[in-house]
Amino acid sequence: MLRSVIPIVVFTPALLAAAEASPDFLRDIRPIFTKNCTMCHGPSMHQSEFRLDRKADAFHGGASGLPAIVPGSSEKSLLIRYVTGADPKLVMPPGGKRLAATDIQLLKTWIDRGATWPDDAPRSPDSAKPDPKQHWSLQQPKVLPPPQVKNTAWVRNPIDAFILAKLEAKGWKPNPAASPNQLMRRLYLNLTGLPPTLAEQAAFAAKPNLDALVENLLARPTYGERWARHWLDVVRYGESNGYERDAAKPYVWKYRDYVIRAFNEDKPFNQFTLEQLAGDELPNPTPTTQIATAYHALGPWDDEPSDPLTDQFDQLDDMVSTTSQVFLGLTLGCARCHNHKFEPLSTKDYYSMVSVFRGLERWRNGRTELAVPTGPKALAIAEHDRKVRRLDRFLEDSRRPYIRKPVPESIVLELEGMEDQMCQLEQRREDTERAYFLQELKPQPRTTNIMIRGSASSPGPEVGPAVPDILTPKQPTFPQLKNSSGRRLALAQWLVSKENPLTARVTVNRIWQAHFGEGLVRTPNDFGVMGERPTHPELLDFLANYFVDNGWSVKKLHRLILQSNAYRMSRTVNEKYLAEDPENRLLWRMPMRRLEVEAIHDSVLAVSGSLNRKMYGPSVYPNVPKEALEGNSDPESIWRPFNEQEASRRAIYAFIKRAFVVPIFEVLDFCDTVRSAAKRLNTNVPTQALTLFNGDLINRQSVHFANRLRREAGPNPAKQIDLAFRLTLARPPTPKEKDQMQTFLKNQPLEQVARVIFNLNEFVYPD
């Protein structure tokens, strides 16, 4: 509802003085419009088809067909009628503070004296900007042939041509290829996050075919475990709600397992998108597609908010902000309180996207989130559970008055009847799988209003579901479904349609980043005006088109990238090139970067022989120092007891608690789980070296590693050292390294040798 507040204008000496002077448009009037009006009636948003940032539009008026400003007559001007509250049905601004009495008087005086608005008055700053529709990322990907290059022998596929063309234009050459052994280890760690075993090293040495190795690794289940983690970063995956209680999200690990399977099955990315945004709205939803929609609920949730209404919009903001960054590479969340300061995104765009997600509801019992039944009868079962909880609470309330006194027989009968009813409901309840996701329970969600200045208590004009206007000349249709609004499905279908120029670009850029350390666009969550331009725009468009033309297959895109000479370059530094291009924007070499914490953790376990390769299921709890737990308010319950066999599973199965990150994960740059993490930090700080040398993981696994070396190499120190290097670095030690290690082993136990090898730079920096 629009609030009808009529300001009372008291003619003070200051107002009389203002009335005597002739208001100046630029000095007195336009600041009033800019501060109070152009948020909804400006260059980015034209509520009721009305603009106040341009002279012709301002005088003409909006959808009513009546002039907003009538020079010489403030009484006939709709602008004055609305800002004074003379029309109780429509008061402007519709929320927040009303115009000051002095501002209203200035507007009336300005209009009564002719409403002088100089024709040459500069428009608002937004109007002077270049046409945002011409921004590179909003254009359809261009279909271009690979460029002609001189060194055609270096070109294994079109990627190489695009890279080499820029290098040749500068008179540069790409780095020579890394050695086959280096490339073997690079591929293993890149695609599976695990080093090659001795048998795998021997098989490759006998037949060093890199293309065949790529196929082999892409077919392994360990590929999904490695690449799912990249996606979990982007979608802010966490297994607890954050805030003070930081309660666990029930069954959320099923979403993690869904992502692992999706990568292993090479689920087409367009289908992957549909299932996560609207798996429950697909024509034939399954438990798998319902589990996929946990995507919406992955973020933090305040189970005891001080302002429930604001909290509702905070949850919706999490969905809108995440979706716009993950699939569009746009920072739409910045338009919650006002039109985006830098991007062509309006507050209307933001709340139109809020409207898409408005129907989703969180299943909970007070402060406790509940798992939701899956399958075709999920809605009916969930509604049944809600009735049981409601009846249970009613029974409890009914008994309360008789806690300390006898219960009359007629009440007794009523209570017994209700208890029988609840038992019957429970008996009829089907045994069904449960998962964690939000649901829409009715086809028509609540209306959505623009919240003036982002305040949940200041509703403005109503908006319907839509995608940002700048992205399409024609809005997609949002047909209503039988059991839900259908809005998320319509959005998802538009996201992966040919009309949208962003999703394919954003996705291939993320895959490129995971292979090369940096994306072709180095701001992977921001393809807008404030984001970086691509280093190789033609290559980005080529990859986007290739991705779509090949059925949105991630594995086919992997093959194309990994078979290129660009990927197979060495990491050798050319001092001349480094001085001119220290950030390697021309891609003249493969960049040097440390492994992520998960790959380090998993490699240590694999080498020591302790890795538990069990896949899927509930998360495990790595060992954490007692001192780390003592700083918490409830150290006894914050973390489950350590089970070494279970905790020796891959790091992707470790429990991700928002308020308590496993110390080694935190030290080695684990991602922020509160919001979409576009890319991991890759720092080098002293605490990392201390953790890898003195931490529980390395010291515990050094014992297991030493036992493995004794078991497999026997008592001979030279053989133990040779085996240790082959297992960790996929190569034998150099004569100097062997000599140094044998000298060290004379004074230290084998466990310390294992500990030193785990801390070699080469172990955590591939090739």
Image: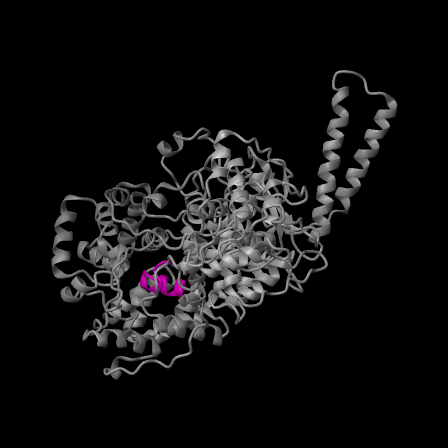
In the image, residue 509 lies in the stretch drawn in magenta: yes
Give the residues drawn in magenta, as a range: 508-523
Nearer-the-camera pick, 178 or 571: 571
Nearer-the-camera pick, 512 or 368: 512
Q: Is residue 564 left or right of residue 67?
A: left
Nearer-the-camera pick, 283 or 71: 71
Nearer-the-camera pick, 635 or 489: 489
Q: Is residue 9 left or right of residue 601?
A: right
Q: Quadrant of residue 575?
A: bottom left
Looking at the rendered image, the quarter that the N terminus falls into is: top right
Residue 508 seen in render: no
Q: Quadrant of residue 291?
A: bottom right
Q: Residue at x 56, y 49 (%)?
A: 72
> Whole-percent x and y of residue 203?
32, 71
> Whole-percent x and y of residue 389?
71, 38
> Looking at this rendering, what residue extends furthest in the right direction?
410
